[in-house]
Amino acid sequence: MSALPQTRPRAATGPSLAARAKRWLYLLHRWAGITLCLFFAMWFISGVVMMYVGYPKLTPAERLRHLAPLDPAGVTVTPAQALAAAGLEDGAALSLSASRAGQAVYMAGGGRRAAPKAVDAASGALLPVADERVAAATASAWFGGAYPVRYAGAVDEDVYTHSRALDPHRPLHRVDAADPEHTRLYISSATGAVVLDATRAERAWNYVGAWIHWLYPFRGNALDRWWHDIVVWLSVAGVTLALTGTVVGLMRWRFSRPYASGSRSPYRENMMRWHHLSGLLFAVVTITWIFSGLMSMNPWKLFASGAAPLAQAAYEGPPAPAATLASPGALIAALPAPPRELSWTRAAGQSLVQARMAAGAPLLLSAREARPAALDPAVLRAAAATLLPGARLAEVQTLERYDFYYYARDEHAMLGHVEKPLPAWRLVYDNPEASWVYLDPATGQLISRQDRANRASRWLFAFLHSWDWTGLLARRPLWDALLIFLSLGGAALSLTGVVIGWRRLGKKLRH
């Protein structure tokens, strides 16, 4: 009988690929969470603050409330003279208000990269940059002389002035007022007009609100050039952490039968148990908010549109000769009361003036005849057809109410300074980018533009991050209660993660 063949002993093998992947998943979530859960907690708590206190800004309504009515006796300079003093010809880039040191001035020209030039409406002189004396006088006039003001120096950029829209006005003069709200005014050195206001409450709450939520400690210093990338990659890491935590949480949860303790969670220690449970309950909202925060930064230009710019010159029509523009005195006489501001505009081939009171919609006047004006819808529609060369104006939708893509927010909200009048026209074009242009039919002014990419951003950022669905916003305080509840749940998830992580780190360091 032959001997049985001898078999070679099987070599010992290490953990399987699945086991190694599981271990790395646990390690990644454990150690990344030590730092990132701090950011999560900060974002959730500061997000609740931002529901009620926004980053300081000057809204049109605030500015108009603080401007004195125009006195026609103090305005002797014509629009033509003001444009000549500023070296300009186009009257559509002109406005008149008592915005500098309480005196009426024309603001001519300007734009996103340059401040307008200030022209004295009484003498016609091109005014120099504003100094400390002008800033103090502007601040005093802002409150009608009712409160003392104190000049607090000039600053190029500080905690409350990171907005790039303020770049043409830097350096900014800071003036503190002794009003009940202890308001700090920021005044343009270029024009001498107020460009930002911030009450003491806004300044204080912003340290635990927008300033920290948007990681503005990285702005205005040596890290400023990397701020965008810092926010983007922290958000990417945050999404990764939240996803790994969700996977780990589901893997550790007993769906079929409980553990020996009777619980479906294996953790007996309170902090671990609450982290596990809150993670499962609030995983989706945590991932959603971190991801939509990432989308707010338009990472890698995901929402960039290749659509052609609007042909505004074709839509507006040729400018009227400056010499034919009516005097401010004639314009004011045509109004029921002196306005706070006059702005020269063009639309559909007409030269117009918008007169703004302290509140309410602007009144429209003919810039030449100084009498009430109205735009012919047919003429306005024909002009709107020229806004996008090569694209057909497929439809004009009249919006009588706000909808998912066109809506207003409270003044303190991020876009609360953008006026959204009703009714409005939505101009739908048949270009490849599926462009929409919103237009105010009462004044002929363009409000905003959306392309397909912008509408994707509306879903992935604004809707997911702020839950600003108009149906929900109209049912406050339901919106408040829901967002606060979800934010507190996310904060509980984050703070328990912070405690667990630092405890583990402390043990490692002691050993």
Image: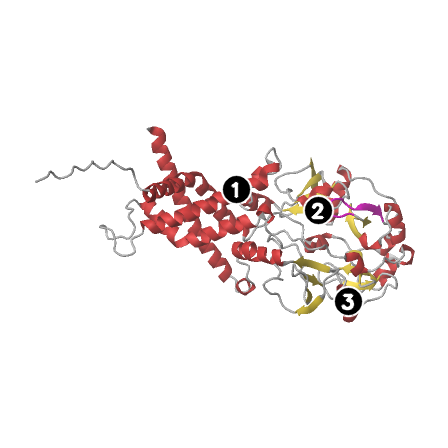
| Residue 13 image-quadrant placement | top left
Q: Residue at x 50, y 58 (%)?
A: 480
Q: Under tag 2, what secondary structure? A: strand
* Nearest-to-viewer mark from 3 and 1: 1
Assign the C terminus to one quadrant of the image: top left
Answer with mark 3 or mark 1, whichever residue precedes in sequence: 1
Q: Amino acid at mark 1?
A: Trp
Q: CA distance from mark 3 to mark 2?
A: 33 Å
Q: Are marks 2 and 1 in contact (CB under 8 Å)?
A: no
**Front-most of residues 236 and 74:** 236
Q: Is residue 183 left or right of residue 348?
A: left
Pinpoint residue 329: horizontal percent, then vertical percent.
87, 58
Q: Is residue 367 left or right of residue 276?
A: right
Q: Under tag 1, what secondary structure? A: helix
Q: Amino acid at mark 2?
A: Val
Q: Amino acid at mark 3?
A: Leu
| Residue 327 image-quadrant placement | bottom right
- Residue at mark 2: 195
Magenta run includes residue 248: no
Labelled disc at residue 233? 1
- Residue at mark 3: 380
Q: CA distance from mark 2 to mark 1?
A: 32 Å
- The segment highlighted magenta reads 110-120
Magenta run includes residue 112: yes
Q: Residue at x 52, y 42 (%)?
A: 233
